[in-house]
Image: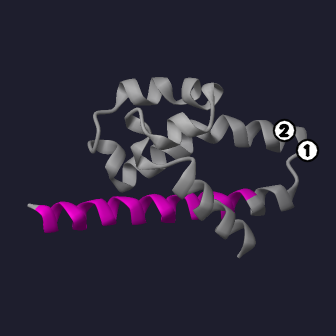
Amino acid sequence: MLFYSIGVYVGTNWITPDLDIISTPTNKHGFIWKLFWTPYRWAHKHQGVSHTFMGSLERVLYISPLFLITFALTGWNKLVLIISAGIVFGIIVANIAHVTLDKIVILIIY
């Protein structure tokens, strides 16, 4: 549950569907974070694929090299795998909640 909660936090504040624009998540976490997500932003139109379930999976795939490096450095430890799975699941849930709330707000406004 702890790692899922960490994933939800990360998915809410760091790896959000709004990474496809110059937004708070890309600006508040420094130049390296902004630089890391620049190719992703160039490849996506705002509220396009990035605001779907597939967009959540794309973001997880985009950061997967970071997980692979962690696994390699820890010797493919099962505990690290379990922790990572909880974090990834939390990120996906937070992203789906973001997309759902965006759609609700759009329905209410228009």
**Residue 81 horizontal side relative to residue 90, left or right:** right
- Alpha carbons under labels 2 and 1: distance apart: 5 Å
Q: Is 3 placed above or below 16 here?
A: below
Name which residue type carries label 1. Answer: Gly
Which mark, by number, is residue 55? none
SS at mark 2 in the image: helix
Q: Is 31 placed above or below 65 here?
A: above
Between 56 and 19, which is closer to the camera in this rendering?
A: 19
The residue at 39%/60% (across/down) is: 98
Q: Main secondary structure of the magenta part?
A: helix
The residue at 51%/43% (across/down) is: 25
The residue at 66%/68% (across/down) is: 4
Dot 2, crowdedness within 10 Å: few (<14), some or many (≥20)? few
**Residue 86 horizontal side relative to residue 76, left or right:** left
Q: Is 1 placed above or below 22 here?
A: below
The residue at 72%/43% (across/down) is: 67
- The quadrant of the image that shows the N terminus is bottom right
Between 77 and 7, which is closer to the camera in this rendering?
A: 7
- Residue 105 lies, in percent from the top left, at 23, 64
Which residue matches tag 2?
Answer: 72
Q: Tell me the quarter of the picture where residue 46 sits.
A: top left
Check if residue 2 falls in the magenta segment. Answer: no
- The quadrant of the image that shows the C terminus is bottom left
What segment carries the magenta color?
A: 84-109
Name which residue type carries label 2. Answer: Ala
**Residue 9 horizontal side relative to residue 92, left or right:** right
Tags 2 and 1 touching, CB below 8 Å = yes
Q: Tell me the quarter of the picture where residue 79 sits.
A: bottom right
Which residue matches tag 1?
Answer: 75
- Residue 90 lies, in percent from the top left, at 59, 64
Dot 1, crowdedness within 10 Å: few (<14), some or many (≥20)? few
